[in-house]
Image: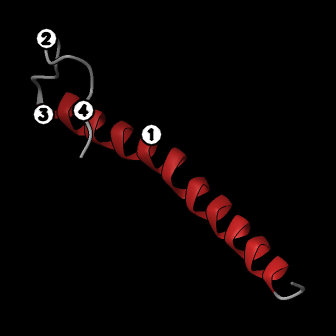
């Protein structure tokens, strides 16, 4: 789960809540997707090094 701010300012309209939800999901995706790809690359390299030891 994620949080946006301290909770003192938040969207009250339906459109504002939808925009907040969409921007939160995009923000998480921008961090989470590359992190998984980078981690998979590191694991691939680590496993490739083990073959030569």
Q: Tell us which disc is closer to us: 3 or 2.
A: 2
Sort mark 3 into few (<14), some (14-19) or many (20+) by Cα contacts within 10 Å.
few
- Residue 5 found in image quarter: top left
User: Which badge, 1 or 4, comes first in the chain's sequence?
Assistant: 4
* Residue corresponding to mark 2: 8
Front of the two marks 4 and 3: 4
Answer above or below: position of 27 versus 39: above
Depicted 44 relative to depicted 31: above or below: below
Q: Along the line of sight, which residue is nearer the eye, 10 or 14?
A: 10
Q: State how far apart marks 1 and 3 are (Cα).
A: 20 Å
Q: Position of residue 14 (x, y in %)?
A: 12, 33
Indicate which disc, 4 or 3, sits on the residue closer to the N terminus.
Answer: 4
What secondary structure is marked by label 4? loop
Is 18 situated left or right of 30 in this image?
Answer: left
Q: Where is mark 3, residue-wise?
A: 14
Residue found at x 61% / y 54%: 34
Q: Nearer the viewer, residue 17 or 45?
A: 45
In front: 46, or 36? Answer: 46
Dot 2 or dot 1, earlier in sequence: 2
**Vertical order, 52 against 46 (above or below):** below
Q: Residue 3 bears which disc, if any?
A: 4
């Amino acid at each position: 789960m994620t949080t946006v701010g301290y909770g003192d300012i938040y969207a009250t309209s339906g459109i504002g809540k939808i925009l907040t939800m969409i921007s939160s999901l995009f923000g998480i995706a921008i961090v989470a997707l590359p992190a998984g790809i980078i981690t998979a690359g590191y694991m691939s390299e680590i496993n490739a090094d083990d073959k030569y030891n």
